Amino acid sequence: MKKKLRIFLLVILSVGFFNCGFKVVKNNNFENISITDLNLNGDSRVNFLIKNKLKIFKKRNAANLIKLDIFTNKIKLIKDKNINNEVSNYEIIINAKIMINNLNTNTKKTFTVKTSADLKVESRNSTTRNNEKKLIDRLSNKIADEILSKISNNIE
């Protein structure tokens, strides 16, 4: 009897969880998008990482041709100092201003993306610099992902 009750509860719960109405949003718009021109100005490392993420969308036979102008700015601020007046934490902020020019419809849209994170200063300078590079890589990938999601939302 207990075994049948467990199986019955398992079936009821699995039906309840798998039919909750959650649907995955697909970005099928990327099949119809081609970035024909990509102009980047600002911080060179951030621009390099964003360009590598966006260059896979250069296709030949796409319905929507897009020109992107991206202006990036990296700011490194002192967040905390210790008792000896030595820096203990930095805040790294990356701003990006993106202008989308849809060449098919001659429409232009502009938006900004901003990400920031904290960087702890380590006892060794080389460790701090490596951590800063990794943090800039993560923030740049986050900006590129946000740019792609905004493009897919703006292009029909």
Image (cartoon, grey):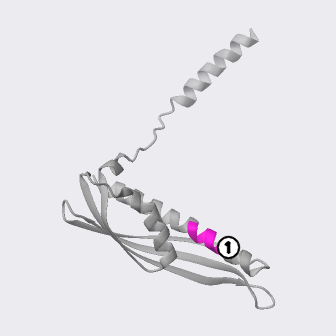
Query: Is residue 105 shown in magenta?
Result: no
Q: Position of residue 3 (x, y in %)?
A: 73, 12
Q: Secondary structure at mark 1?
A: helix
127 over 52 or under it: above or below: below
Is 135 covered by the magenta stretch?
yes
61 left or right of 7? left
Q: Quadrant of the N terminus?
A: top right
Main SS of residues in magenta:
helix
User: Which residue is found at the position 49% from the left and 68% from the top?
Assistant: 49
Q: Residue at x 76, y 88 (%)?
A: 86
The residue closer to the viewer here, 54 or 24, is 54
Q: From this viewpoint, which residue is outermost toward the front?
A: 60
Is the residue marked by circle 1 packed among few (<14), some (14-19), or many (20+) residues within 10 Å?
few
Residue under circle 1?
130
Q: Nearer the viewer, residue 113 or 19?
A: 113
For the record, the magenta segment spans 130-137
Residue shown at 48% from the left, 78% from the top:
44
Which image quarter: residue 98? bottom left
Residue extending furthest left?
105
- Is residue 5 positioned above or below 125 on the image? above
**Rendered image quadrant of residue 103:** bottom left
- Seen at 73% across and 75% down, the residue is 127
Position of residue 100 measured from the top left corner of the image (x, y, whole percent): 30, 67
Q: Is residue 110 above or below residue 20?
A: below
Amino acid type for the residue under numbered disc 1: Asn
Q: Residue furthest top?
A: 1
Tally the numbered discs. 1
